[in-house]
Image (spheres, grey):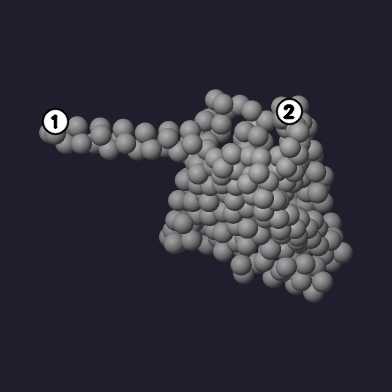
Amino acid sequence: MITIETIIVLILCTAGSFGHLFAITILYSMLDPSNLLLISMSCAQLILCMNYLYSTLYKFLADVQCVSTLWSYGWVSVNISVIAHTNGMFHVVALSILRYISLNQLTQIHSTQPWFTIKKSIYSIIIIIFCALIVCVPFLFNSEVRGVQQHATCTKQNPSLANISSHELAFTSFAMSISLGRINFWIFGTICKLVPCSVLVLMSILLLKKLKDIHNISERFMSASREKVHSRTTIIILIIMVVFVFVELPQGILSLISSISGYNLLDNTGELFDILSLLNSCIVFALLCSMNSRIRNTIFNGVFSLLRCRNICKNVR
Protein backbone atom coordinates (compact mmCIF):
# COMPACT_ATOMS: atom_id res chain seq x y z
CA MET A 1 0.00 0.00 0.00
CA ILE A 2 1.28 3.44 -0.93
CA THR A 3 2.04 5.68 2.08
CA ILE A 4 1.44 9.40 2.55
CA GLU A 5 5.22 9.94 2.61
CA THR A 6 5.51 8.30 -0.82
CA ILE A 7 2.73 10.50 -2.21
CA ILE A 8 4.43 13.66 -0.87
CA VAL A 9 7.79 12.60 -2.35
CA LEU A 10 6.20 11.86 -5.74
CA ILE A 11 4.44 15.24 -5.82
CA LEU A 12 7.60 17.14 -4.85
CA CYS A 13 9.75 15.13 -7.29
CA THR A 14 7.38 15.76 -10.18
CA ALA A 15 6.95 19.46 -9.39
CA GLY A 16 10.69 19.96 -8.91
CA SER A 17 11.62 18.06 -12.09
CA PHE A 18 9.22 19.96 -14.34
CA GLY A 19 10.03 23.25 -12.61
CA HIS A 20 13.80 23.01 -13.03
CA LEU A 21 13.48 21.67 -16.58
CA PHE A 22 11.35 24.70 -17.38
CA ALA A 23 13.84 27.07 -15.70
CA ILE A 24 16.76 25.53 -17.61
CA THR A 25 14.93 26.05 -20.92
CA ILE A 26 14.16 29.71 -20.20
CA LEU A 27 17.62 30.52 -18.81
CA TYR A 28 19.29 28.87 -21.81
CA SER A 29 17.35 31.16 -24.17
CA MET A 30 19.02 34.21 -22.58
CA LEU A 31 22.45 32.78 -21.86
CA ASP A 32 24.98 34.87 -19.96
CA PRO A 33 27.64 34.02 -17.32
CA SER A 34 25.26 34.26 -14.34
CA ASN A 35 22.47 32.33 -16.06
CA LEU A 36 24.95 29.63 -17.09
CA LEU A 37 25.80 29.07 -13.41
CA LEU A 38 22.09 29.04 -12.53
CA ILE A 39 21.48 26.49 -15.30
CA SER A 40 24.18 24.27 -13.81
CA MET A 41 22.61 24.61 -10.36
CA SER A 42 19.16 23.78 -11.77
CA CYS A 43 20.64 20.74 -13.54
CA ALA A 44 21.95 19.46 -10.19
CA GLN A 45 18.51 19.96 -8.62
CA LEU A 46 16.83 18.32 -11.63
CA ILE A 47 19.05 15.23 -11.34
CA LEU A 48 18.31 15.10 -7.60
CA CYS A 49 14.53 15.27 -8.13
CA MET A 50 14.54 12.73 -10.98
CA ASN A 51 16.70 10.31 -8.98
CA TYR A 52 14.34 10.56 -5.99
CA LEU A 53 11.40 10.03 -8.36
CA TYR A 54 13.03 6.97 -9.89
CA SER A 55 14.08 5.52 -6.51
CA THR A 56 10.62 6.02 -5.01
CA LEU A 57 8.84 4.42 -7.97
CA TYR A 58 11.40 1.62 -8.06
CA LYS A 59 10.96 0.76 -4.37
CA PHE A 60 7.17 0.84 -4.69
CA LEU A 61 7.00 -1.28 -7.84
CA ALA A 62 9.82 -3.71 -7.00
CA ASP A 63 9.33 -4.13 -3.24
CA VAL A 64 5.60 -3.45 -2.72
CA GLN A 65 3.97 -4.44 -6.02
CA CYS A 66 6.59 -7.18 -6.54
CA VAL A 67 7.23 -6.49 -10.23
CA SER A 68 9.93 -9.11 -10.76
CA THR A 69 11.15 -7.49 -14.00
CA LEU A 70 12.69 -4.74 -11.87
CA TRP A 71 14.74 -7.17 -9.80
CA SER A 72 17.52 -7.34 -12.40
CA TYR A 73 20.93 -5.69 -11.92
CA GLY A 74 20.48 -2.70 -14.24
CA TRP A 75 17.49 -1.22 -12.41
CA VAL A 76 19.23 -0.57 -9.08
CA SER A 77 20.40 3.02 -8.52
CA VAL A 78 23.55 3.65 -6.46
CA ASN A 79 25.26 6.85 -5.20
CA ILE A 80 23.61 9.28 -7.68
CA SER A 81 21.61 11.00 -4.95
CA VAL A 82 24.65 11.79 -2.76
CA ILE A 83 26.65 13.17 -5.71
CA ALA A 84 23.75 15.31 -6.97
CA HIS A 85 23.03 16.55 -3.44
CA THR A 86 26.66 17.53 -2.80
CA ASN A 87 26.90 19.12 -6.24
CA GLY A 88 23.81 21.24 -5.55
CA MET A 89 25.17 22.32 -2.16
CA PHE A 90 28.50 23.37 -3.65
CA HIS A 91 26.67 25.36 -6.34
CA VAL A 92 24.93 27.45 -3.69
CA VAL A 93 28.25 28.07 -1.90
CA ALA A 94 29.83 29.17 -5.19
CA LEU A 95 26.81 31.36 -5.97
CA SER A 96 27.16 33.15 -2.63
CA ILE A 97 30.89 33.76 -3.12
CA LEU A 98 30.45 34.99 -6.70
CA ARG A 99 27.62 37.27 -5.63
CA TYR A 100 29.82 38.82 -2.97
CA ILE A 101 32.58 39.42 -5.52
CA SER A 102 30.03 41.00 -7.88
CA LEU A 103 28.79 43.35 -5.16
CA ASN A 104 32.36 44.19 -4.24
CA GLN A 105 33.02 45.11 -7.87
CA LEU A 106 29.90 47.26 -7.80
CA THR A 107 31.29 49.31 -4.93
CA GLN A 108 34.33 50.12 -7.05
CA ILE A 109 33.13 53.37 -8.59
CA HIS A 110 35.59 53.29 -11.49
CA SER A 111 34.80 49.66 -12.37
CA THR A 112 32.63 49.52 -15.51
CA GLN A 113 33.67 46.21 -17.12
CA PRO A 114 31.81 43.03 -16.07
CA TRP A 115 34.25 40.79 -14.25
CA PHE A 116 32.27 37.52 -14.51
CA THR A 117 32.60 36.19 -18.06
CA ILE A 118 31.33 33.03 -19.77
CA LYS A 119 34.84 31.57 -19.51
CA LYS A 120 34.97 32.17 -15.75
CA SER A 121 31.47 30.73 -15.38
CA ILE A 122 32.49 27.53 -17.19
CA TYR A 123 35.63 27.23 -15.05
CA SER A 124 33.53 27.73 -11.91
CA ILE A 125 31.11 24.97 -12.93
CA ILE A 126 33.98 22.58 -13.72
CA ILE A 127 35.58 23.26 -10.32
CA ILE A 128 32.24 22.77 -8.51
CA ILE A 129 31.53 19.43 -10.21
CA PHE A 130 35.13 18.24 -9.77
CA CYS A 131 35.11 19.06 -6.04
CA ALA A 132 31.75 17.31 -5.57
CA LEU A 133 33.02 14.17 -7.31
CA ILE A 134 36.27 14.13 -5.31
CA VAL A 135 34.42 14.52 -2.00
CA CYS A 136 32.01 11.70 -2.91
CA VAL A 137 34.72 9.17 -3.90
CA PRO A 138 34.66 7.37 -0.48
CA PHE A 139 30.90 6.85 -0.84
CA LEU A 140 31.48 4.83 -4.02
CA PHE A 141 33.02 2.10 -1.83
CA ASN A 142 30.14 2.24 0.65
CA SER A 143 27.49 0.21 -1.19
CA GLU A 144 27.11 -2.28 -4.02
CA VAL A 145 24.44 -4.11 -6.01
CA ARG A 146 24.42 -7.68 -4.75
CA GLY A 147 22.70 -10.71 -6.28
CA VAL A 148 20.43 -12.81 -4.03
CA GLN A 149 18.59 -16.07 -4.70
CA GLN A 150 15.16 -14.57 -4.08
CA HIS A 151 13.40 -11.38 -3.03
CA ALA A 152 13.00 -11.54 0.77
CA THR A 153 9.71 -9.62 1.07
CA CYS A 154 7.90 -10.59 -2.12
CA THR A 155 8.66 -14.29 -1.78
CA LYS A 156 6.76 -14.36 1.52
CA GLN A 157 3.78 -12.61 -0.08
CA ASN A 158 3.84 -14.71 -3.24
CA PRO A 159 5.63 -18.11 -3.01
CA SER A 160 5.45 -18.52 -6.81
CA LEU A 161 8.22 -15.89 -7.09
CA ALA A 162 10.64 -17.98 -5.01
CA ASN A 163 12.52 -19.27 -8.08
CA ILE A 164 13.26 -15.77 -9.44
CA SER A 165 16.63 -14.33 -8.45
CA SER A 166 16.89 -10.70 -7.38
CA HIS A 167 19.38 -7.89 -6.80
CA GLU A 168 19.50 -5.55 -3.85
CA LEU A 169 21.50 -2.60 -2.58
CA ALA A 170 23.81 -3.61 0.27
CA PHE A 171 26.87 -2.38 2.17
CA THR A 172 30.19 -3.62 0.85
CA SER A 173 32.36 -5.80 3.07
CA PHE A 174 34.84 -2.90 3.11
CA ALA A 175 32.10 -0.55 4.34
CA MET A 176 31.07 -2.90 7.12
CA SER A 177 34.28 -2.06 8.94
CA ILE A 178 33.72 0.49 11.70
CA SER A 179 36.52 2.76 10.51
CA LEU A 180 35.19 3.28 6.97
CA GLY A 181 31.63 3.73 8.21
CA ARG A 182 32.71 6.44 10.61
CA ILE A 183 34.90 8.10 7.99
CA ASN A 184 31.97 8.27 5.57
CA PHE A 185 29.70 9.74 8.24
CA TRP A 186 32.40 12.28 9.09
CA ILE A 187 32.90 13.28 5.45
CA PHE A 188 29.15 13.51 4.85
CA GLY A 189 28.60 15.49 8.05
CA THR A 190 31.53 17.90 7.83
CA ILE A 191 32.69 18.39 4.22
CA CYS A 192 29.28 17.85 2.58
CA LYS A 193 27.15 19.62 5.21
CA LEU A 194 28.75 21.55 8.10
CA VAL A 195 31.58 23.23 6.17
CA PRO A 196 29.30 24.47 3.35
CA CYS A 197 26.71 25.63 5.93
CA SER A 198 29.41 27.52 7.84
CA VAL A 199 30.56 29.19 4.62
CA LEU A 200 26.96 30.13 3.78
CA VAL A 201 26.44 31.68 7.23
CA LEU A 202 29.67 33.67 6.85
CA MET A 203 28.77 34.77 3.32
CA SER A 204 25.29 35.81 4.50
CA ILE A 205 26.87 38.19 7.01
CA LEU A 206 29.29 39.54 4.40
CA LEU A 207 26.53 40.00 1.81
CA LEU A 208 24.35 41.92 4.25
CA LYS A 209 27.30 44.15 5.13
CA LYS A 210 28.05 44.70 1.44
CA LEU A 211 24.41 45.60 0.75
CA LYS A 212 24.65 48.26 3.44
CA ASP A 213 27.83 49.63 1.82
CA ILE A 214 26.12 49.74 -1.58
CA HIS A 215 23.16 51.58 -0.08
CA ASN A 216 25.50 54.22 1.34
CA ILE A 217 27.30 54.60 -1.99
CA SER A 218 24.05 54.76 -3.96
CA GLU A 219 22.97 57.82 -2.03
CA ARG A 220 25.91 59.65 -3.61
CA PHE A 221 26.79 57.99 -6.91
CA MET A 222 24.27 55.33 -8.04
CA SER A 223 20.66 55.48 -9.16
CA ALA A 224 18.02 54.18 -6.76
CA SER A 225 16.60 51.79 -9.38
CA ARG A 226 20.00 50.17 -10.00
CA GLU A 227 20.56 49.67 -6.28
CA LYS A 228 17.06 48.19 -5.94
CA VAL A 229 17.74 45.57 -8.66
CA HIS A 230 21.03 44.45 -7.08
CA SER A 231 19.50 44.38 -3.60
CA ARG A 232 16.51 42.28 -4.72
CA THR A 233 18.70 39.71 -6.48
CA THR A 234 21.06 39.50 -3.49
CA ILE A 235 18.17 39.07 -1.04
CA ILE A 236 16.78 36.19 -3.13
CA ILE A 237 20.21 34.54 -3.11
CA LEU A 238 20.36 35.07 0.66
CA ILE A 239 16.99 33.32 1.04
CA ILE A 240 18.30 30.36 -1.00
CA MET A 241 21.34 30.24 1.29
CA VAL A 242 19.23 30.34 4.47
CA VAL A 243 16.91 27.58 3.21
CA PHE A 244 19.90 25.36 2.40
CA VAL A 245 21.39 25.94 5.86
CA PHE A 246 18.04 25.15 7.51
CA VAL A 247 17.75 21.84 5.61
CA GLU A 248 21.38 20.70 5.56
CA LEU A 249 22.70 21.74 8.99
CA PRO A 250 20.65 19.19 11.03
CA GLN A 251 21.82 16.39 8.70
CA GLY A 252 25.41 17.49 9.16
CA ILE A 253 25.11 17.52 12.94
CA LEU A 254 23.49 14.06 13.04
CA SER A 255 26.13 12.65 10.66
CA LEU A 256 28.95 14.07 12.76
CA ILE A 257 27.45 12.57 15.93
CA SER A 258 27.08 9.25 14.08
CA SER A 259 30.75 9.32 13.09
CA ILE A 260 31.72 9.81 16.73
CA SER A 261 29.27 7.37 18.34
CA GLY A 262 29.31 4.72 15.60
CA TYR A 263 25.49 4.59 15.63
CA ASN A 264 23.55 5.62 12.51
CA LEU A 265 21.21 8.39 13.68
CA LEU A 266 19.98 9.09 10.14
CA ASP A 267 18.09 5.80 9.79
CA ASN A 268 14.97 7.06 11.56
CA THR A 269 15.02 10.51 9.94
CA GLY A 270 15.91 9.55 6.37
CA GLU A 271 12.42 10.03 4.88
CA LEU A 272 11.97 13.38 6.65
CA PHE A 273 15.26 14.73 5.28
CA ASP A 274 14.42 13.39 1.81
CA ILE A 275 11.15 15.34 1.86
CA LEU A 276 12.92 18.47 3.15
CA SER A 277 15.57 18.17 0.41
CA LEU A 278 12.90 17.89 -2.28
CA LEU A 279 10.95 20.77 -0.76
CA ASN A 280 14.17 22.78 -0.77
CA SER A 281 14.61 22.01 -4.48
CA CYS A 282 11.08 23.27 -5.22
CA ILE A 283 11.75 26.42 -3.18
CA VAL A 284 14.94 27.04 -5.18
CA PHE A 285 12.88 26.90 -8.39
CA ALA A 286 10.31 29.32 -6.94
CA LEU A 287 13.09 31.73 -5.95
CA LEU A 288 14.65 31.45 -9.41
CA CYS A 289 11.27 32.47 -10.80
CA SER A 290 11.12 35.49 -8.51
CA MET A 291 14.67 36.42 -9.54
CA ASN A 292 14.01 36.25 -13.29
CA SER A 293 11.16 38.26 -14.83
CA ARG A 294 11.12 36.19 -18.03
CA ILE A 295 10.50 32.95 -16.13
CA ARG A 296 7.74 34.66 -14.14
CA ASN A 297 6.09 36.08 -17.26
CA THR A 298 6.27 32.75 -19.09
CA ILE A 299 4.60 30.96 -16.17
CA PHE A 300 1.88 33.60 -15.84
CA ASN A 301 1.23 33.59 -19.60
CA GLY A 302 1.08 29.79 -19.62
CA VAL A 303 -1.37 29.66 -16.71
CA PHE A 304 -3.47 32.43 -18.28
CA SER A 305 -3.56 30.57 -21.61
CA LEU A 306 -4.64 27.33 -19.91
CA LEU A 307 -7.42 29.11 -18.02
CA ARG A 308 -8.52 30.86 -21.19
CA CYS A 309 -8.62 27.58 -23.14
CA ARG A 310 -10.59 25.98 -20.32
CA ASN A 311 -13.19 28.75 -20.41
CA ILE A 312 -13.45 28.52 -24.20
CA CYS A 313 -13.98 24.75 -23.98
CA LYS A 314 -16.74 25.24 -21.40
CA ASN A 315 -18.49 27.80 -23.61
CA VAL A 316 -18.29 25.48 -26.63
CA ARG A 317 -19.98 22.71 -24.65
Q: Are marks 1 and 2 in contact (CB under 8 Å)?
A: no
Residue 64 disc label: none
Q: Residue at x 56, y 26 (%)?
A: 30
Residue closer to the observer: 117 or 138? 117
Q: CA distance from mark 1 to mark 2?
A: 57 Å
Q: Quadrant of residue 38?
A: top right
Q: Residue at x 76, y 27 (%)?
A: 119
Q: Residue at x 76, y 71 (%)?
A: 257
Residue 316 disc label: 1
Q: Secondary structure at mark 1?
A: helix
Q: Quadrant of residue 269?
A: bottom right
Q: Quadrant of residue 273?
A: bottom right
Q: Earlier in the sequence, mark 1 or mark 2?
A: 2
Q: Residue at x 66, y 40 (%)?
A: 221
Residue 206 in the image, given as x and y percentages of width and height: 73, 54
**Amino acid type, mark 1:** Val
Which residue in the protein does label 2 denote? 113
Q: Quadrant of the N terminus?
A: bottom left
Residue 69 in the image, given as x and y percentages of width and height: 54, 42
Q: Quadrant of the C terminus?
A: top left
Residue closer to the observer: 156 or 265? 265
**Amino acid type, mark 2:** Gln
Q: Is residue 138 visible?
A: yes
Q: Is residue 38 left or right of residue 29?
A: right
Q: Is residue 67 visible?
A: no
